[in-house]
Image: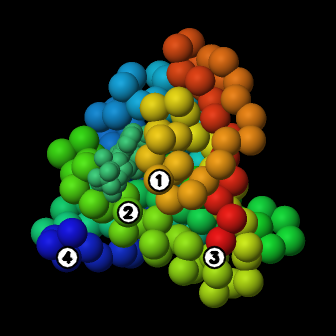
Amino acid sequence: METNIIFRPYSSTDKSVCLGLFDANCPEFFAPNERVGYAEFLDANPFDYELCLTEDKVAGAFGLSEHGLQQKSLNWILLNPRSQRLGIGSVIMSRISAVALDSGASLINIAASHKSSPFFAKFGAIEIATIDNGWGSGMHRVDMELRL
Ligand SMILES: CC(C)(COP(=O)(O)OP(=O)(O)OC[C@H]1O[C@@H](n2cnc3c(N)ncnc32)[C@H](O)[C@@H]1OP(=O)(O)O)[C@@H](O)C(=O)NCCC(=O)NCCS
C-alpha cells in the first residue's frame, strides 16, 4: 500500500459522506434495507467510528466498539468502490487489531456478509454462524470471530 492513509474520528458533519459510501456499495455489498440501520448508527455519533482519508478525500469508514469482557466488535467497515482492492482494508485490519490488543481484547466479533466474509477470512476470522438472507433479500449474514 503506497498511498498515505490518514485516520480521523467521525463527526456528525460526516453523515452524508458516509451514507454516500453506503449508497455506492448498495446493492452489491449491502441490502437496501440496511441503510436505515446505518443512518441510526451514525445519528448516535459513535465516538469510536473513524474515517480513513487518502489524498484528502474520504476513502472509507469503520468502527471498533466494546463488546463485553475482552471483546470488540467491528462496525460498518466500508470503502468507496474506487478505493477497494488497493490494500486499504488490510491497513484498517492491522489498525483495529492493534487497537483491540492495546485495550486488552483478545477477540473481535465481525457481522459480515457472504460477500465480505472471504476478506475477513484472509486475516484469520472464522465463521461461527450464517443466516440466509440475514441482512435482506439475497444478502446472507455471516457472523465471524477474529482471535487476536
Ligand atoms: C471489504 C473491504 C473493506 C475490503 O477492503 P479492501 O481495501 O478492498 O481490501 P484489500 O485491498 O486490503 O484486500 C486484501 C485481500 O482481500 C481480498 N479481498 C478484498 N475484498 C474482498 C472480498 N469482498 N471478497 C474476497 N476477497 C476480498 C483482496 O483481493 C486481497 O487479497 P490478496 O491479499 O490475495 O491480494 C472493502 O472491499 C469494502 O469496503 N467492501 C464493500 C463494503 C463491505 O462489504 N464491507 C463489509 C461489511 S461487513
Ligand 1 within 8 angstroms of badge 2 C-beta = yes
Q: Position of residue 39 (x, y in %)?
A: 52, 41
Inspect the image, locate mark 4, and give the three-letter code of the amino acid beneath it. Answer: Asn
Distance, label 1 to label 4, CA atoms, is 23 Å
The mark nearer the N terminus, 2 or 1, is 2
Q: Which residue is mark 4?
A: 4
Q: Secondary structure at mark 1?
A: loop
Tell me the quarter of the picture where residue 104 sits: bottom right
Q: Nearer the viewer, residue 14 or 5?
A: 5
Q: Which dot marks residue 20? A: none
Distance, label 2 to label 1, CA atoms, is 9 Å
Tell me the quarter of the picture where residue 29 sits: top left
Colour scheme shown = rainbow
Q: Position of residue 102 (x, y in %)?
A: 63, 87
Q: Which residue is mark 2?
A: 90
Q: Nearer the viewer, residue 5 or 125?
A: 125
Q: Which dot marks residue 122? A: 1
Q: Secondary structure at mark 4?
A: loop
Q: Which dot marks residue 100? A: 3
Q: Secondary structure at mark 3?
A: helix
> Eyeballing the image, is 148 above or below 46?
below
Q: Position of residue 97 (x, y in %)?
A: 56, 73
